[in-house]
Image: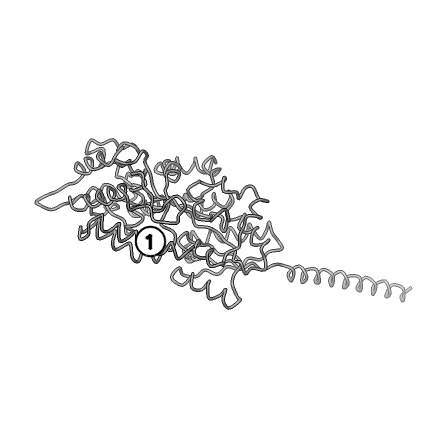
């Protein structure tokens, strides 16, 4: 009897050890079978709101995809694109990278990005028709989709509603309908005392090409021709636009600081609301499209959308696509709004959600964002770094100092842009 009890006990111990070994082996095999997906980004992970968003992505995505482990690397934007190219050349490239519109087309032309059409065909929620239309200019060429829009921004005209009311102006979003009305309003908004301007009507932006594009959009013009193969701005519309912006400078209507309320309007963007609120919580401001120009037939802006892409060197296309569909999906857009206070989702369905309606109730300036982004024309995105370095100073000279005529600035700019465009084909 004693022997039998000892034998039974041994069998139980052996059985327990076998079960434990199987469980341990399963865990090891499970961990080993996880695909490690390398994702690179230039966003500043030291920013608490950005960290909160990516913590949410990691936790939620990995829970829904237990066979994938995310490996993030956040690289300063000044080094980001060089690091990607170097990693590709060295055979150690990541799988997924966020790309700015100013670099994505260049990467595609160099063969660095995977064509995503087959994936998109199997995933209707990622089809271009699901996104704000102007954002889809930047992520495809000749029908080949090489990126899925992740975040969206647009230029916008910001205005101090209190200043408008004090000057007897209509402070509704489309209260100023035309350039002529804008100039007349600007003259009413300016304040001068003892030969010194204490409040200006308008503040220029730091990117003269973008500003030129936004105002030209309302005047019937575009930076490119219809198929993006040549410059489209050296026209009557372009000359009128530069001359209009030049007049704001020469007539001493432009200057000051919008946040400090020494300027009544400002060229800025749809992302600006939280910056203004943090700088001056009491500022009563509105956000709108730019008023119609003399040769145009609509209000306008400039809209763009940075994207998630898959490098052509990846060995994990399926896992990469699962990640992209997650971060470019509706719930991710809602979390960007909640965690980062950023109304940046490019998905059309986002603007029908209760999350969006709640955000507008809390931040009335957001109400115009759908109108602003849908009115957008093209950003000068192809070879932007090269174009900006050479064309930016010409546009700035014509606008801010009148050291160059609009006609000369546009002629020289056209030659530069056409040369760069010819090199991309």
Residue at 62% over, 53% down: 66
* Residue 11 against residue 136 in the figure, above or below: below
Residue at 36% over, 54% down: 384
Q: Quadrant of residue 337?
A: top left
In-image side of 300 versus 30 (left or right): left
Kindly give the residue lying farthest to the bottom in the view shown. Answer: 90
Residue 118 % position (x, y):
58, 48
Mark 1: give few (<14), some (14-19) or many (20+) Cα within 10 Å: many
Residue 10 % position (x, y):
83, 65
Between residue 141 and residue 176, name the one nearer to us.
141
Residue at 80% over, 64% down: 14
Kindly give the residue lying farthest to the left in the view shown. Answer: 194
Label count reads 1
In-image side of 195 versus 34 (left or right): left
Kindly give the residue lying farthest to the right in the view shown. Answer: 1
Residue 26 % position (x, y):
70, 60
Residue 208 % position (x, y):
28, 50
* Residue 94 against residue 410 in the figure, above or below: below
* Quadrant of image for the N terminus: bottom right
Q: Which residue is mark 1?
A: 417
* Quadrant of image for the C terminus: bottom left
In-image side of 106 versus 254 (left or right): right
Residue at 76% over, 60% down: 19
* Residue 130 against residue 115 in the figure, above or below: above
Q: How is the image coloured?
A: one colour
Q: Secondary structure at mark 1?
A: helix
In-image side of 250 versus 335 (left or right): left
């Amino acid at each position: 009897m004693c022997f039998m009890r000892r034998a039974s006990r041994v069998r139980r111990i052996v059985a327990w050890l076998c079960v434990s070994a199987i469980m341990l082996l399963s865990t090891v095999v499970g961990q080993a079978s996880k695909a490690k997906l390398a994702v690179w980004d230039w966003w500043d992970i030291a920013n608490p709101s950005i960290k909160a968003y990516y913590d949410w992505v990691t936790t939620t995505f990995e829970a829904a995809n237990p066979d994938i482990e995310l490996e993030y690397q956040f690289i300063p934007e000044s080094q980001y694109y060089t690091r990607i190219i170097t990693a590709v050349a060295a055979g150690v490239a990541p799988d997924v990278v966020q790309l700015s519109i100013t670099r994505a087309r260049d990467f595609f032309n160099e063969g660095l990005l995977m064509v995503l059409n087959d994936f998109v065909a199997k995933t209707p929620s990622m089809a271009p028709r699901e996104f704000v239309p102007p954002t889809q200019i930047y992520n495809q060429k000749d029908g080949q989709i090489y990126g899925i829009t992740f975040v969206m921004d647009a230029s916008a005209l910001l205005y101090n509603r209190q200043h408008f009311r004090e000057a007897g102006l209509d402070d509704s979003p489309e209260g100023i309908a035309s350039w002529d009305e804008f100039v007349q309003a600007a003259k009413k908004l300016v304040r001068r005392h003892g030969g010194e301007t204490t409040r200006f009507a308008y503040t220029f932006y730091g990117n003269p090409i973008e500003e030129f594009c936004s105002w030209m959009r309302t005047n019937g013009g575009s930076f490119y021709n219809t198929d993006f193969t040549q410059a489209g701005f050296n026209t009557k519309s372009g000359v009128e636009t530069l001359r209009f912006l030049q007049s704001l400078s020469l007539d001493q209507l432009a200057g000051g600081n919008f946040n400090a309320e020494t300027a009544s309007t400002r060229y800025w963007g749809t992302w600006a609301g939280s910056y203004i609120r943090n700088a001056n919580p009491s500022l009563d401001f509105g956000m709108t499209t730019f008023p119609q120009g003399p040769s145009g037939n609509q209000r306008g802006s400039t809209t763009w959308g940075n994207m998630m892409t898959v490098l052509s060197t990846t060995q994990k296309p399926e896992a990469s696509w699962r990640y992209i569909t997650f971060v470019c999906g509706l719930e991710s857009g809602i979390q960007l709004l909640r965690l980062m206070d950023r109304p940046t989702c490019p998905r059309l369905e986002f603007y029908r959600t209760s999350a969006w309606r709640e955000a507008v109730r809390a931040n009335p300036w957001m109400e115009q964002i759908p109108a602003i982004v849908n009115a957008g024309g093209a950003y000068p995105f192809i070879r932007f770094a090269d174009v900006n370095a050479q064309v930016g100073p010409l546009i700035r000279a014509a606008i801010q100092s009148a050291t160059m005529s609009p006609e000369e600035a546009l002629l020289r700019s056209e030659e530069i842009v056409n040369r760069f465009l010819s090199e991309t084909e």
